[in-house]
Image: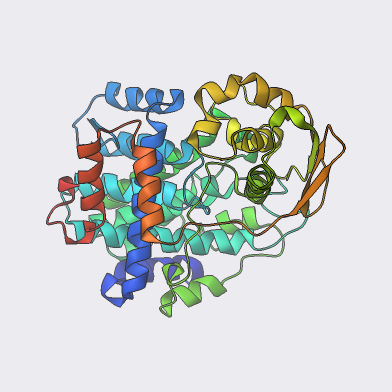
Amino acid sequence: MRTPVADALTDFARRFSCDAMSAQARERARLVLLDTLGCALAARPHKIGRLVVAQARAAGGAPQASLIGGGRATALQAAFANGALANAVDFDEGSHVATFALPAALAMAQRQRASGAAFFEAFVVAFEAGTRLKDSIDARAGDDSLAARGFWSVGVIGPVASALAAARLLRLDDARTRAALSLAACAGGGLRLQLGAPAKALHSGQAARAGCEAALLAADGVSGDPRALDHPQGLLAAFAAPRGVDGAPFVAMNAGELAFDAPTKIKAMPVCTPIAPALDAAIALARAHDLRADDIAAAHVDFQRGSLFRDLPPDEDSAPFCAPFLVAAALARRQATLAETSGPALQDAQILALAARVRHAPGESLTLDMRDGRRFTQKLAGVRRLTGADEVIAKFRACAAGALDEPDAQALLARAMRVDALAELCDL
């Protein structure tokens, strides 16, 4: 029975070796791993972070895997909690694939007492597979696209990619790896409506846990229809809509073309990506002209309503998706950091007052009308990413500061950057 996508994913998961990665691709993978750990640590003090960690601890069972930032739980509970943590502050790598790839690989590698190298390979397998799955269903724009119909790709493809990481660490054969994929397909779902709500973080947690559970069930002999990914009534066709699935990304994957061969999408700001250029423009104008927030009569910029459909943040979960608030905060504080999407910034009277004067204006520039009659315009540039190791490490330190003391953060940083050399992943 020919199942092109399932076969390609199984072949890749079973036969991939990091020996085939270039030194640059390995470095990029380590940096994405470190960045995702940092984003999870940044979420530990948040309400959703505290709740998912508390639930994981309260569930009981054998303490098989670490909770990022402290504590242990069963592998399935750790996969869920760590996935939610990685997603919660919306500061993670821009594709969001690492938010389930890392937690699934981390939980199962610790459960199996695997080496750092085995964990690293499983993480790369899940990240590469998740990237291809996302590309195959996200590439098409239009009224019948995945996003236009209200689905979020994290919840659709996350369980399948996570299952591959878990299957590899469990050393499942071809047949049982395919079974794990079929079982993981049962969990596909996810709503864009939840962007900016606490529930948004659960997409990654549920994906990581479902993938691990699917692999464990497959290991015990549970099976599903082997066509669950490829059939016209299967997962990908159902979500990719009438024009079908693009198989080219899977062919390229098994030909040795890796996502990590290309520059990563590590975020420079803890915000929904489409608004980031507007925030860079706001910061540049405020600094260049020494602008005061109270002197700005109005700001005009595209709100990118496709993803940023909220205005004022009632809490830290919604802040990364509130365009008027984010633009106002960037203008008032001349920066866009974690401090602008949490804590006192959410009740800052000056920021909230300016947010009411930020207007939606489709286009490629930000315009400021000053109370004294002056007007400033800044063209929007592309999305700025962090690519250098120094930048990513600085971001990790900032994210970790609220959850770990400096010695623990430094120890985690050092181990994460040589994770593939650790004799046992528990040393992480």
Q: How many discs mark residues in the rendered view?
A: 0
**Residue 311 x/y as whole percent:** 71, 30
Q: Is residue 80 visible?
A: no
Q: Is residue 60 left or right of residue 104?
A: left
Q: Residue at x 72, y 23 (%)?
A: 353
- Vertical placement of residue 84 versus 34, above or below: above
Q: Quadrant of residue 38?
A: top left
Q: Residue at x 39, y 58 (%)?
A: 126
**Residue 158 x/y as whole percent:** 47, 50
Q: Is residue 305 left or right of residue 156?
A: right
Residue placed most toward the observer, 385 or 45: 385
Q: Is residue 163 left or right of residue 365?
A: left
Residue placed most toward the observer, 102 or 213: 102
**Residue 235 x/y as whole percent:** 56, 54
Q: Residue at x 65, y 19 (%)?
A: 349
Q: Residue at x 51, y 50 (%)?
A: 268
Q: Quadrant of residue 194?
A: top right
Residue placed most toward the observer, 188 or 143: 143
In the picture as drawn, the residue positioned furthest to the bottom comes out as: 255
**Residue 257 x/y as whole percent:** 44, 76
In the picture as drawn, the residue positioned furthest to the left comes out as: 423
Q: Is residue 340 visible?
A: yes
Residue placed most toward the observer, 8 or 385: 385
Q: Quadrant of residue 52?
A: top left
